[in-house]
Image (cartoon, grey):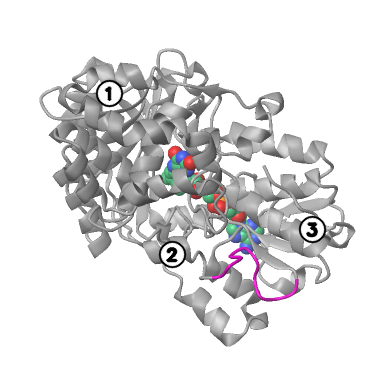
Amino acid sequence: MSRPDSDFDAIVVGSGPNGLSAAVVLAQNGLSVKVIEAADSFGGGTRTKELTEPGFLHDVCSAVHPTAAGSPFLSSLSLNKYGLEWIHPDYPVAHPLDHGQTVVIERSFDKTLDRLGKDAKNYRNLLKDMIDSWPFLAKDIFGSLRNPKHPLSLARFGWYGMFSAKLLSQSIFDTPELRAYFAGLAAHSILPLEKAFTASFGLILGISVHSVGWPIAKGGSIKISEALVNLFTELGGEVELNRRIRDLRELPDSVPILFDLTPHQINDIAGFHFKKTFSNKLKAYKYGPGSFKIDFALSEQVPWENPENAKAGTLHIGGTFNELAYSEREVWKGNHPEKPYVLVAQQSNFDPSRAPKGKHTLWAYCHVPNGSTKDMSIEIENQIERFAPGFKDTIISKSVMNTVQFEKYNANYIGGDINGGAQTFNQLIGRPVLKWNPYKLPYKQLYICSSSTPPGGGVHGMCGFNAAKSVLKNEFGIKIDI
Ligand SMILES: Cc1cc2nc3c(=O)[nH]c(=O)nc-3n(C[C@H](O)[C@H](O)[C@H](O)COP(=O)(O)OP(=O)(O)OC[C@H]3O[C@@H](n4cnc5c(N)ncnc54)[C@H](O)[C@@H]3O)c2cc1C
């Protein structure tokens, strides 16, 4: 039986990685904190379930965790003591191309350079300094961009990052292989690759391959959430499940409330307290394209044409730069590409606990227009089959989720947007609205701590950390930093 809300010093609504991170920070600083979660299990976008067959563990949402491994906050927590173990696949990422070619990027920068031939020098010149300064850079990128602590490293990142992925890759790389690889990284932005600042997504992910790796969690992504909850409860925190907050009046009005929710949801819950101008800004907040996902139970490993691909944790499927750029442009325009850019993770190749002996799981999704109900199974399977002939014959069963099912699963995925809002330039600098402190909402002690705040989508907990830092300073006069 859960203790009454009024017993607590602060309430967090939503138990995604940002909600849990915010809760941990507040509890670490002596507050008694309750997390209220609508679903019957905690973790938001960081959960693992038997979606297909008994014994096959599928990451329902997040699977691969460069941002968690590189998060200044999460890496300060020693989550290994609370059950989290990272597994680093042999290769973090591979980008298959036609005729059995593939771009393999190793965690070792030098070994990668040895593979890159003509583009090795360009790759080195672009990334070496930023990889070396990553420990400082990460704090500025993931922290509050408004007060950079290492302006020089940030300026270098900002110079390259402000370009479109198309312009940067064309001006830096000579080979179609490296251009295609950079497109695969930058397309995580879910934006057309001709848009300014899409290069920044490619850079962050490209740097992280070498600085922290692209690990998966042993036993599934749920282990990240479990570790955070284990730490949180050890600090005296409480998580209440199966309780959806619909109206602010359901919560005490004398303590800080942190919403791990997106702007439209917050406006529905508390909008009647905001001035009309602020409420209109929340309503005007834009959500980006959605995702269509398939989880496969397989009878064997994917039969990649190039066997090197079996050693990569993540694969970016879709071919050349132009093919990926076309796919993302089409989605942005509201169309469903016939040959989508597909993100693939093959966790069971590196973590035997994910599937019965000899069997395998495969995690795959592509971008689709917001609100789409189209079944993209055939398009996704055709793309994988293109680089792995015989793949379709290995499928034992599958589970699919379109954008409507995603939103039903987690109310934060509005129209299937998995990043808490489009990550356009305007919504990166003003997330959720343009304000010096984006975490404070203009009513009493209300805050927002979800991926709809800087630094945006991904499992890193830094939105939660930044919001909690603001709560501690504003409401309790406690100053913290990492
Ligand atoms: C298919 C997919 C693949 C992804 N892959 C990756 C990946 O590989 N790596 C990566 O880093 N990130 C990935 N992500 C993104 C990542 O999962 C999100 O960015 C992250 O979970 C956002 O965390 P959050 O805490 O802001 O919100 P969420 O994780 O969305 O958590 C919000 C929580 O709030 C709860 N909630 C909503 N409304 C209410 C309410 N009214 N009352 C109470 N509770 C409520 C929800 O049930 C949910 O538990 C992926 C996401 C998806 C969907």
User: Which region shows up in magenta?
Assistant: 435-444
On the image, the x and y values in percent for residue 191 come to: 31, 55
* Tag 3 secondary structure: strand
Cα–Cα span, label 1 and label 3: 47 Å
* Tag 2 secondary structure: helix
Q: Is residue 299 visible?
A: no
**In the image: residue 325, left or right of residue 403:** left
Q: Earlier in the sequence, mark 2 or mark 1?
A: 1
Q: Nearer the viewer, residue 279 or 370?
A: 279
Q: Is residue 105 visible?
A: yes
Q: What residue is shown at x 48% (from left), y 50% (from top)?
A: 457
Disc number for residue 10? 3
> Which residue is identified by label 1?
104
Q: What residue is shown at x 39% (from left), y 56% (from top)?
A: 403
Q: Earlier in the sequence, mark 1 or mark 3?
A: 3
> Which residue is identified by label 2?
427
Q: Earlier in the sequence, mark 2 or mark 3?
A: 3
Q: Which three-letter amino acid code belongs to the residue tagged 1? A: Val
Q: Nearer the viewer, residue 151 or 144?
A: 151
Q: Which three-letter amino acid code belongs to the residue tagged 3? A: Ala
On the image, the x and y values in percent for residue 188 come to: 35, 46
Please name which of the two marks, 2 or 3, marks the residue nearer to the observer: 2
Tell me whether the residue at label 1 lies in contact with that at label 3, contact meaning CB atoms closer than 8 angstroms.
no
Specify few, some or many for label 2: CA neighbours under 10 Å numbering under 14, 14-19, or 20 or more.
Answer: many
Cα–Cα span, label 2 and label 3: 28 Å
Image quarter (top left, top right, bottom left or bottom right) of the C terminus: top right
Tell me whether the residue at label 2 lies in contact with that at label 3, contact meaning CB atoms closer than 8 angstroms.
no
Q: What residue is shown at x 45% (from left), y 30% (from top)?
A: 132
